[in-house]
Image (cartoon, helix red, strand yellow):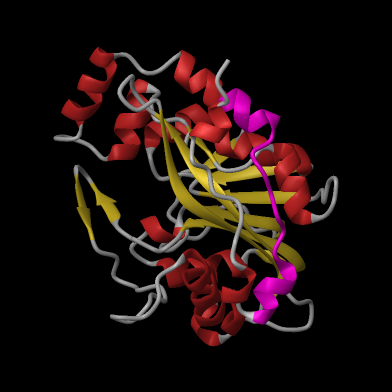
Amino acid sequence: MRDVLANAGLRYTADDSRLLGPLRARFVQLEADESTRRWIERAERQPHGSFRMFLRRALDRWMSAYDANAWLDVHEMRVLGREQWSRVLGAERPGGRLLDVGAGDGRVTAELAPLFDAVVATETSKRMAGRLMARGFEVHRVDLSREALPDPRLFDGVSLLNVLDRTSFPLTLLGAALGRLEPGGLLLVAVPLPLRPHVHVGADTADPEELLPRPAPGQASSWEASASLLHEGLFAPAGLELLALSRAPYLSRGGRARPVSALDGSIFAYRKPSDRAPPRAMVDP
């Protein structure tokens, strides 16, 4: 059998010399493990059929990509497996309560959930929320950048997995997430790099209203430069303590012509200091 990992072009390594000092010291090297191999082999063995992909393209005319994916159960996503998450966090199981913001259909959440005692998810798509509930997760249909979470308690961990580059208000969302995090709690962020943010508005896409740090014209836009810029321009000013940075592909399952797609992804793990509140621009609105 051919080596699906070798042929997938997955990127896990980074050029240390191009990372800022704090990122270089906290870089956690991952690799394509057995669970990644199994995921890719299943995607290639069972790609979405032509008719389903035709319907998926047709639905783009009337609804958002998220709702269309949920209707047809297509484009399954993968960030990290459970063992990979444990390596990033440096602990077998941190425990406590996790808030997963923009959890989609719950497949990505399901890999992280065993490391916590309880998981609460948010999701704005009605169909995606239905799939989350079918998986047994507690779900609130709120946009945390605009609405308060009905659950008043703080969380031991908050995850923003491939969400910041798909919301119109990423800065507000980050502030709201930090406002729901216990002092000393974990913030987990996944985002493809370099950044290419856009927002799904019904069947259309638009530019976000709040801008994340991005390279200036002519400035280096490598994965390493982009990770350094995001840390220095967004997370460090929020007073967060960097625990780990990893590079790992953001995988998506597709049709026969392209069973697996991969974006060059990053995983940031931070701790919210116990003696410092987020700056005024990052507080819960």
* Residue at 50%, 81% in the rendered image: 233
Q: Is residue 203 left or right of residue 111?
A: left
| Image quarter of residue 157 | bottom right
Magenta residues, dominant SS class? helix
Q: Nearer the viewer, residue 135 or 151?
A: 135
Q: Nearer the viewer, residue 269 or 149?
A: 269
Quarter holding the N terminus? top right
* Residue at 49%, 77% in the rendered image: 229
Count of numbered marks? 0
Q: Is residue 214 left or right of residue 275?
A: left
Q: Is residue 131 left or right of residue 186?
A: left
Q: Nearer the viewer, residue 154 or 18?
A: 18
Q: Is residue 172 inside the magenta stretch?
A: no
Q: Is residue 139 left or right of residue 44?
A: right
Residue 14, compared with residue 126, is above or below; it is below
Q: Is residue 106 visible?
A: no
Q: Is residue 24 inside the magenta stretch?
A: yes
Magenta residues (range): 21-39
Give percent across and percent down for residue 79. 56, 43
| Image quarter of residue 69 | top left
| Image quarter of residue 75 | top left
